Image (cartoon, rainbow, N blue to C red):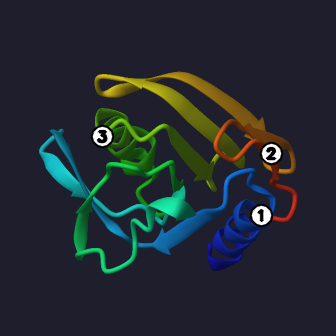
Amino acid sequence: MNGCIMRIVKQVLAASATPMDFSGQKGLIVPVVEGHGRVIPDLTFAPAKLDLFLDAPTWMPATGVAMVVEITSSSPDHDRNAKRRAYAAAQIPLYLLVDRQRHEVTLYGDSARNEYTSSSTVRLGGGVKLPEPSSFTLETESFVV
């Protein structure tokens, strides 16, 4: 899992059209969905110019977050469903899910209420086209899952 996280961070920081900052395991306050109003993504990205993570409290609002990333663990349904709906409810533009059990990567976008209305899935090894503000293709062939 750490290898995958490292590869995602390196690519986003190096290739994103907009300079990005990131935080690992950053607590986000989101609208209550399925009984949860707080979530901790594996990775959280935001435009660097916002300085969202500088002096941020342990739990911070999701406002300004550009993308969250989850890498499925022993409870993949929580990442696939509950967290996806929570991120959509918080209007986080992009949710990238690396599904280790299914050997695929899904990018969710266009949030409306508690759901994303668009998604794109590739098998591990393929490329995921990240839209603005990143505007590059995230390569997944080196992901170790």
Between marks 2 and 3, how big is the CA–CA gap? 24 Å
Q: Dot 2: what SS?
A: strand
> Residue tagged by mark 1?
11
Horizontally, residue 110 falls left or right of residue 130, namely left
Residue type of the residue flagged with mark 3:
Ala
Does residue 42 sit above or below 121 in this rendering? below
Is there CB contact under 8 Å for labels 1 and 2? yes
| Residue drawn at (63%, 39%) of the image | 106
Does residue 117 sit above or below 129 in this rendering? above
> Residue tagged by mark 2?
136
User: Which residue occupies the foreground of this view, 143 or 102?
Assistant: 143
Q: Quadrant of the N terminus?
A: bottom right
Residue 25: where, in percent of width, then height?
Answer: 41, 72
| Residue drawn at (44%, 68%) of the image | 51
Residue 89: where, in percent of width, then height?
Answer: 29, 34
| Residue drawn at (48%, 66%) of the image | 42
Q: Quadrant of the C terminus?
A: bottom right
Residue type of the residue flagged with mark 2:
Phe
Q: Quadrant of residue 120?
A: top right
Q: Residues within 10 Å of mark 1 (few under 14, many from 20)?
A: some
Horizontally, residue 52 falls left or right of residue 43, namely left
> Residue tagged by mark 3?
90
User: Which residue occupies the foreground of this view, 113 or 106?
Assistant: 113
